[in-house]
């Protein structure tokens, strides 16, 4: 082989034009791979630390809401958060059957009037924390000192109500009455 043929093969290998795509891709990713490999011992603990801080802050926020409810609500005899809406499916039932059971002990919210809610009030924060994103309306949340809140979600029961099965709603009513120590 003459020198020009060797030089041609060498130059095609060096430029990644040898037909092997893996060599070409490895060359283009190389500038990105080096900083990631070098910085990973720093970035992984940093990301873990950030995650840990977020978990601790979320735990503190939840604890602060609980503590505020125990101090501000329970001392005034308010141990229930009651949320309903103007839905024709459950409005009448919730206002005539459930609200009279708990009205003296409840903080009442109408989901249909949520635009008028004070965004950072304790009751709205409690609703957002305990209501979640699914099946949050109608809802009864029962608070007890130094215990986790008990949630009674009526939406699945009213879904059965629409299909003619009233037992699930009545079962929830009995559960709430028993939890409150009321005759069912």
Image (tube, grey):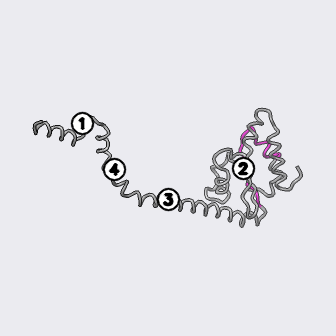
Q: Which type of secondary structure does the marked residue at label 3 adopt?
A: helix
- Tell me, for residue 48, which label it has, or none: 3
- Tell me, for residue 7, which label it has, or none: none
- The residue under label 4 is 32
CA distance separating discs 3 and 2? 38 Å
Quadrant where the N terminus sits is top left
Residue at 81 percent of width and 48 percent of height: 98
- The residue under label 2 is 83
Q: Which type of secondary structure does the marked residue at label 1 adopt?
A: loop
Residue at 31 percent of width and 44 percent of height: 26
x and y, in percent, of residue 73 in the image = 73, 63
Answer whether labels 1 and 2 touch (C-beta < 8 Å). no
Residue 67 lies left or right of residue 174; in this view the side is: left
Q: Which residues are magenta?
A: 78-97
Q: Nearer the viewer, mark 4 or mark 1?
A: 1
Label 1 vs 2, first from the N-terminus: 1
Label 2 vs 4, first from the N-terminus: 4
């Amino acid at each position: 082989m003459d020198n020009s043929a060797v030089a041609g093969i060498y130059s095609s290998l060096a430029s990644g034009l040898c037909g092997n795509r893996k060599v070409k891709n490895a060359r283009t990713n190389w500038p990105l791979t080096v900083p990631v490999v070098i910085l990973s011992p720093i970035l992984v603990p940093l990301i873990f630390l950030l995650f840990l801080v977020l978990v601790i802050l979320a735990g503190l926020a939840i604890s602060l809401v609980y503590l505020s409810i125990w101090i501000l609500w329970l001392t005034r005899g308010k141990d229930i958060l009651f949320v309903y809406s103007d839905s024709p499916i459950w409005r009448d039932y919730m206002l005539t059957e459930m609200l009279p059971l708990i009205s003296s002990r409840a903080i009442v919210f109408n989901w249909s009037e949520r635009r008028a809610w004070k965004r950072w009030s304790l009751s709205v924060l409690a609703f957002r924390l305990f209501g979640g994103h699914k099946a949050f309306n109608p809802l009864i949340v029962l608070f007890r000192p130094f215990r986790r809140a008990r949630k009674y979600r009526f939406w699945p029961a009213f879904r059965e109500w629409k299909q003619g099965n009233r037992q699930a709603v009545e079962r929830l009513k009995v559960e709430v009455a028993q939890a409150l120590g009321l005759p069912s």
